[in-house]
Amino acid sequence: MAVSSAEQSQVIKNLVKAAQAADAPLVGSVDTILRHLEEAGYCYRATLLPRQIGVAPSNRDGYGVNAEDVHSLGHDIAFMGWSWSEVSKAICIEEQPGKTYIEDFNTKLTESSELLPPVVKDSIRYGSISCSHTNMFLRCIAHGVKSSDDLVAVGGKLSLEHLAQRDHEFARAVREGLPWSVLSWRVEAEFPGVLSLIQSARNASGQVARSEHEMQVMLRIQALALSEQKR
């Protein structure tokens, strides 16, 4: 018997609630949620250029990414070698039609740093939930931002041509982008909490674990306090 969209939605809501339990198997639960989201038409696969994707405002509790971490990860990847399997679980979310919330967030995130690429107006239409540091570094290379890393830089700037000589596949990722699981913009409103679950699960099982910063922890505490006030 065919399952209605309303029934599919309720199943996903129940899965999200179960995954939020303290003793829930987070990674496995999120894999199940993502499968149901895809089956219900809330998720699809697409290869997207790095410049199309910024960091989702909800990523890392509103902290976004840290420039030093982005470049540190880029160095690690250049040293160890690019792996497509390590980015096979990249996830992003669509910008809501008619809005520029994701682009505005990334403009503020990058405008005061020489180590992060500037945002070209009307270029960002998606926000990364996982692989945020990796995609940001791809954007850094494409833009040739400031760097003293001899593995990937020439004359004090990141160089795509220099990188291509060392790692053709890494350079191809800069030019062509990553394969993404793309969440519909409706997901954030219809399934509250699911983006945080996905991000936490992908951080736990991702290619390189990045520690939480003090500012991220403070933002999480603030968000929890605001949530309690609304109850």
Image (cartoon, rainbow, N blue to C red):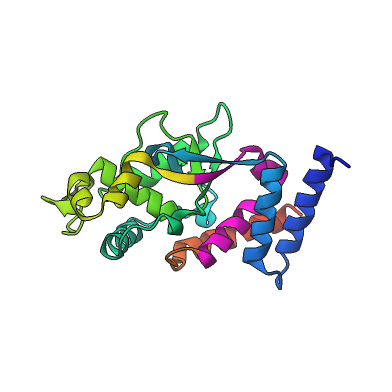
Considering the image in quadrants, where does the N terminus appear?
A: top right
Left or right: residue 2 versus residue 134 is right
In the image, residue 169 above or below residue 26: above
Q: Residue 99, position in %: x, y?
A: 54, 30
Report the span colored magenta.
180-205
Q: Residue 128, position in %: x, y?
A: 49, 47
Q: Is residue 27 visible?
A: yes
Q: Residue at x 54, y 56 (%)?
A: 61
In the rendered picture of this protein, how many numbered marks are placed on residues? Answer: 0
In the image, residue 123 above or below residue 21: above
Q: Residue 223, position in %: x, y?
A: 60, 56
Q: Quadrant of residue 123?
A: top left
Q: Residue 19, position in %: x, y?
A: 71, 62
In the image, residue 31 above or below residue 138: below
Q: Residue at x 17, y 57 (%)?
A: 148
Q: Quadrant of residue 70?
A: bottom left
Whether the magenta-drawn stretch holds residue 230 is answered as no
For the stretch drawn in magenta, the main secondary structure is helix
Left or right: residue 215 versus residue 74 is right
Left or right: residue 196 versus residue 67 is right
Q: Is residue 112 visible?
A: no
Whether the magenta-drawn stretch holds residue 188 is answered as yes
Q: Residue at x 44, y 43 (%)?
A: 54
Q: Is 147 or 153 nearer to us in this picture?
A: 153
Considering the image in quadrants, where does the C terminus appear?
A: bottom right
Q: Is 174 or 147 nearer to us in this picture?
A: 174
Q: In the orientation shown, which residue stands out farthest toward the top?
A: 98
Q: In the orientation shown, which residue stands out farthest toward the left?
A: 155
Q: In the orientation shown, which residue stands out farthest toward the right?
A: 1
Q: Residue at x 66, y 43 (%)?
A: 187
